[in-house]
Image (cartoon, grey):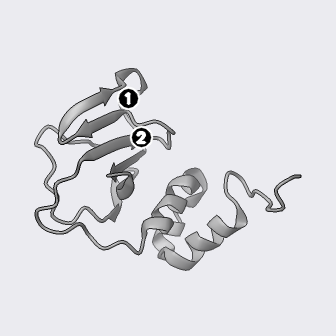
Amino acid sequence: MTNPRVIVGDLFPEELQMIRDRLPEHLQDLGADHMQTLASIAEAWHLEPLPAGYAPEMVDVYVEEQEDPILSYEHWEMSVASPEFFPEKFTVLALEVDSVLRYAQIRGQEVFNRLGNVELPEDFAFAAA
């Protein structure tokens, strides 16, 4: 039996509607090339920032809407690094903290930040193209 939902581009209609319902227009306007990132942001939009003193167990770094992280940190110790997948310049950067999206940049612009008071290590710096 086939799925009765119709896919529009890479997204289901419900995901497109969630983007329209939850995200401000200026973020929706970033759309066409970054729909999967916008859908992930829309899903996490309601989250509160992490509380002061929060110590993440895992932080995963994604670029260009790849399925696998290019970097993973466990208790701020690098546990996985995939430099062959790390482009010199990228347009999308996303951070998941303990498997939940908490930060995203598109074209160097911070578009989502629910990190709260989590302090990132000094060597944890990225600049998107």
Q: Does residue 129 appear in the picture of this structure?
A: no
Query: How many numbered badges does the structure rendering display?
Result: 2
Residue bearing mark 1: 86
- Looking at the image, the residue that sits furthest to the bottom is 21
| Residue shown at 29% from the left, 65% from the top | 114
Q: In this view, does 82 lie to the left or right of 119?
A: right
Q: Residue 115's image quarter?
A: bottom left
| Residue shown at 67% from the left, 57% from the top | 11
Q: Where is residue 124 in the image (x, y as percent from the top left)?
A: 19, 41
| Residue shown at 31% from the left, 36% from the top | 72
Residue kind at label 2, given as amino acid type: Val
Q: In this view, does 108 lie above or below 88?
A: below
Q: Nearer the viewer, residue 126 or 95?
A: 95
Q: Position of residue 8 (x, y in %)?
A: 74, 58
Residue kind at label 1, given as amino acid type: Phe
Residues marked 1 and 2 touching at CB (< 8 Å): yes
Q: In this view, does 71 lie above or below 103?
A: above
Q: The C terminus is located in which quarter?
A: top left
Q: In this view, does 74 lie above or below 81?
A: below
Residue bearing mark 2: 63
Q: Which of marks 1 and 2 is nearer the N terminus?
A: 2
Q: Does residue 53 appear in the picture of this structure?
A: yes
User: Label 1's element?
Assistant: loop
